[in-house]
Amino acid sequence: MKYTILFLLFPVFFSCKSKKCLVKNATPTKDTIYLENPKTGEMTMKIVEKVANPDGDWKLVNVSNQHSDEMERLTLSINSKKNEFNGYDGCNTYFGSLGGKTGTAIGFNDLSKTERACMVPAKYASIFYKQLEIATSYEASGNFLILKDEDGKMLLRFEKKE
């Protein structure tokens, strides 16, 4: 009896047709990105996991091809299911609603923030908010999120928070 069951299931597991379907429907999970070191100009190739959406917690690492360790104080959290975003600019918290529902389009709408008087001012906050307002698309790959303007120029680059 048990040999009959194995005999009947054997073609299901090892048929060419089922393998072709699995391979045909498989989507690539890796992507190659190139990163430039702003200090040296050296290019580095990284193979990263593909991400279909920008959801998650991110820290800022690059504004318009400029980098500073101080930027990493700025954070961004995106929840596309709830259609909202929020974060911390190094002094104040901010929040708003997401726009752009097709493909890689994105918009940061109804931006509001707290108005705390901070001892250490958030050095990159004002440029960060300006860039966030003009972002129209994103590219998300593995540990990186890049926000771009309508011409496809990189505005902000984030790294996944640990």
Image (cartoon, rainbow, N blue to C red):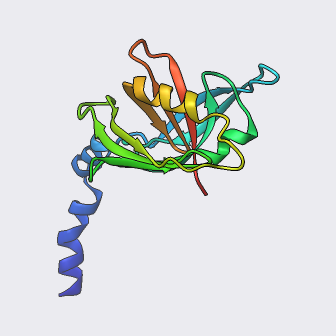
Assign the C terminus to one quadrant of the image: bottom right
Q: Who's the residue at 67% across and 42% down the image?
A: 121
Q: Who's the residue at 54% across and 32% down the image?
A: 128
Residue situated furthest right in the rendering: 40
Q: Who's the residue at 46% across and 23% down the image?
A: 148
Image spot of residue 120 (x, y percent): 72, 46
Q: Who's the residue at 60% across and 49% down the image?
A: 117
From the viewer's perspective, is 135 left or right of 22?
right
Assign the N terminus to one quadrant of the image: bottom left
Image quadrant where residue 106 sits: top left
Image spot of residue 103 (x, y percent): 28, 30
From the viewer's perspective, is 12 left or right of 27?
left
Q: Nearer the viewer, residue 73 or 78?
A: 73
Residue 14 in view of the camera: yes
Residue situated furthest front in the rendering: 117
Q: Is residue 47 above or below residue 92?
A: above
